[in-house]
Amino acid sequence: MNSGFNLAWIELTDLPSWQAAFTGGPVLGVAVAVLAICSSAGCLYHRRRKPKGCLDPKKFKAFKLIKKTQISSNTARFRFALPTPTSRLGLPAGQHVVCRGRDAQGVEITRSYTPITLDSDSGHFELVVKMYPNGRMSHHFRQMRLGDDLPVRGPVGPFKYSPGQVRALGMIAGGSGITPMFQLIRAILENPKDRTSIYLVYANTTFEDILLKEEMDDLARKFTDSFKVYYVLSKPPEGWSGGTGHITKAMIQSHCPSPATNIKVLRCGPPSMNRVVAAHLDELGYTPQMQFQF
């Protein structure tokens, strides 16, 4: 591309006089050539740009369920196809989507979910959904079969992440609240230019309730200097070496970055857990600017 522009410049400067540039003589052909080169370069630029995401923040668009994997007694992993194998969802890290369905009475319902996939996972996106016995949207996901469509819109959410915006991230999650954390963990660790350190405290009731444990353990082994995870169980199995009971101030002090202007602590989980953790963070000196709740 650069050689084309240099050739055009040589032809212009080889003219007998700069005045020729304004006479419409031989320079006209050169100008046309320059415009052609610019036009070609522009077309090439447009062809190489990232494809537009599939989401629309205002309108629901339907995506077909192509795979459903049960990962615990009440939780499943749903994979939805994008229009083409190279399509991307178009969801910035830290944001989520709104899904639409119908409850057991046939009433339309919407709920927010965070895909565990990134835009680099082209051709599809995945949701990990915990289905509660009386959950209205849970009913819709329980009834979904391969080939069914899920209406989705987005991106939505106030959290904006950019690589390197903080030195370290503390993450405190409970149950299915791990999904926005996992998405962000992947986005950071899979970007070689992002040096952000991540400290995750993840609480559940039983060992079987820990979602995406295999994936997180793999990341912790691969990125030993950048990612630390600490599991907490209120009903641990015999021989459990992680945390027991509920998340305490001592756990936060030991497994999250200390309060500082260049850190942030994110939390996501059941309302009762969020309230307790927020109180702990306040007492430990984390300012409102250092905290964010998904």
Image (cartoon, rainbow, N blue to C red):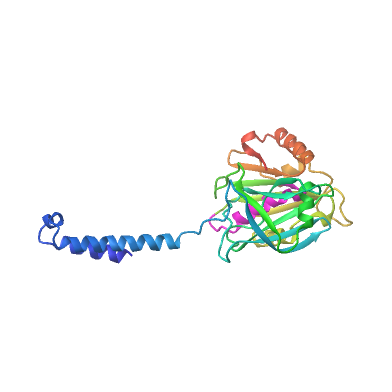
Residue 224 in view in this figure: no
- Left or right of residue 90, residue 228 in this image: right
Left or right, 150 with reference to 38: right
Instruction: Give the number of callouts.
Output: 0
Return the x and y of residue 212 as percentages of the image width and height: 74, 58
Identity of the residue furthest to the front in this view = 106
Q: Residue furthest left?
A: 16
Q: Is residue 8 left or right of residue 90?
A: left
Q: Nearer the viewer, residue 124 or 204?
A: 124
Q: Position of residue 189 (x, y in %)?
A: 61, 57
- The overriding secondary structure of the stretch rendered in magenta is helix
Q: Please check the rendered image and state whether residue 145 is part of the magenta-colored stretch, yes or no.
A: no
Q: Which quadrant of the figure contains the N terminus?
A: bottom left
Tell me which residue sits at (72%, 53%) in the image: 229
Q: Which image quadrant is residue 223 in? A: bottom right
Q: Residue at x 88, y 55 (%)?
A: 237
**Image coords of residue 107 (percent x, y):** 76, 45
Q: Please identify the quadrant where the C terminus is shown.
A: top right
The answer to which image quadrant residue 277 occupies is top right
> Is residue 134 rendered to the left or right of residue 166?
right
In the depicted structure, whether residue 117 falls above or below residue 268: below
For the record, the magenta segment spans 172-193
| Among the 4 quarters of the image, the one containing residue 34 | bottom left
* Residue drawn at the location 74% of the way across and 61% of the way down: 214
Residue 205 location (% of width, % of height): 84, 50
Q: Nearer the viewer, residue 12 or 68?
A: 68
